[in-house]
Amino acid sequence: MTTHQPEDTATTQSWFRQFMSDYRGSLDFSSEDSLLQLNNSIEDEDPVLHEFRGATFLVDLTAEGASLQADEDDVQKVLDQLRDHYNITQTSLLTGTEDNSTVDTPQLPPDGFSAQCNSLEPLTHFLNIIIHAAEECLPPTRYLKYLQFEVYGAEMQEMFDMEYPLRPDILALLPSCTPHQRDTLTSWSDVAVIVGVNHRPLELIQTLSICASRYLTVDRRRSFCIAITFNYQTLKMHFLIFHRSGISFSPPLSLNHVDGFQSAIKHMVGILSIQDEAAFGLDMTRVGNVYNLNDHGYHIIHTHHSNNIVCGRATVMYSLQRTEVVFNSL
Amino acid sequence: MLCQTTGVQDSISAISQPSSQMLILFAELPEKIIYKLSYQIEGHALKAALLSQSFGQFGIADVVGFYTSSQVPFATTTSHLLNSQFLKLVDDSVVGIPEARYLHCTAMSLEGLSLDNTITSLKEVETVTERLAPADLLETILHAIIGEYDSAFTFS
């Protein structure tokens, strides 16, 4: 996960001020020692971490009734399919070097990658092969059935910050979207899952938090954001849900261990088992810019207020006007 | 347009546990409304209940409908917090407890009744001041102006 960071100290302070200002819009980071304060009490001074202060939780995301609920039988089917049809097991996955992974045979070096850029393609291969295995053994009616991960690393279409844009490492686009073309930028509204790759967890969470904020801001039908972190040195993954009560983390899933490998598959099955838009956390009373209220369509004619935080009330207030559109299906 | 009250207030005031129910109490909505969506902590009182007591008086926008739910993923964070444990991100993290949030949707008229109407009403028997204690009335007016609502508002 990358954001552009200038080299020298003076510019770095300027970058931080811009970063903070962009994120909160109201904080004053003009004092000379703001960077020192950030280091002394990171959670107090970093606006990103401050937003989630006391609101980070360890959760079994795949448990019954949880966001990424996964059926044990389905998980076993996908594990069997990976083993029998793709020759993918925890052992076979970790027999590679940094550059011999392919789309059909994902491989990771057991000692981790030496650089972040070397890990992106192999990780993408691994995530996509799970999707292919799931296609063949999970029920056909699933909202994210045709999910596909791809290395991104480019700016997003919605330029919240022209000077220092976000460049997500890997994205999974919604099934309804066409694959990303190199000459076009992807919109946050087309994204289903965000993947961040780094060996510094806090930095990764900070950047993913900003991505989640953008993701939820661009489409206010959404209520949560699914993300994955990957430490390219230790081969540990986390599955995350950013939501209005904070961040829910899966336990660390080490691909160096069978349990971690199987649990990573289980979380992916949980994502792929999401049945419909409602389970994906979308507002089913709204289509585009029209709300369905008491079987009447109400078009948004003005947004009076929109609080674009992830965690908190996230209040939004609209002026609505009745239209002739009727939502019989809602 | 001058919007009249809709009768939804009685339903709002009857709710004792606003965050644990699924309620759609929209009456016939006007052509134009203000629609507010906000995720409130579990147990937090409905703002609709506060504002609806003014019945549009004193220029306070009248509440014409509201909705809260714990039944759909969009409207609650409960599914993200099942059996959750606090996870310390940094050494000096403040230990937090999971707080489920629920979506509160409030539909309001574009504006409250005119001041002339208020003065007229005050002269009549059916005045808002008979329904609201002075402190509640002041709180409602201040909230409508400032937009803050953190007091320990309780339902009768």
Image (cartoon, coloured by chain):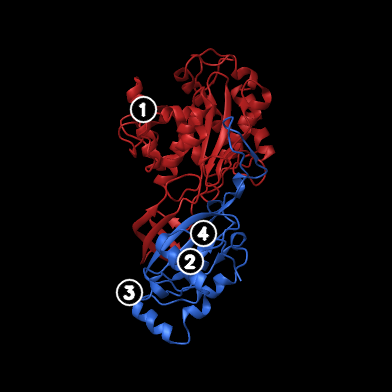
Looking at numbered disc 4 in the image, what kind of residue is underneath it? His
Name the foreground residue: A50 vs A259. A50
Q: Are marks 2 and 1 in contact (CB under 8 Å)?
A: no
Q: CA distance from mark 3 to mark 1?
A: 51 Å
Same chain for mark 2 and mark 1? The answer is no
Q: CA distance from mark 2 to mark 1?
A: 43 Å
- Chain A: give its colour: red
Secondary-structure class at tag 1? helix
Q: Are marks 1 and 4 in contact (CB under 8 Å)?
A: no
Give the mark toward the camera: 1 or 4: 1
Instruction: Provide the chain ID for the residue under circle 2.
Output: B
Instruction: Provide the chain ID for the residue under circle 3.
Output: B
- The x and y percentages for residue A224 are 51, 45
* Location of mark 1 (residue): A13
Looking at numbered disc 1 in the image, what kind of residue is underneath it? Gln
* Location of mark 3 (residue): B1
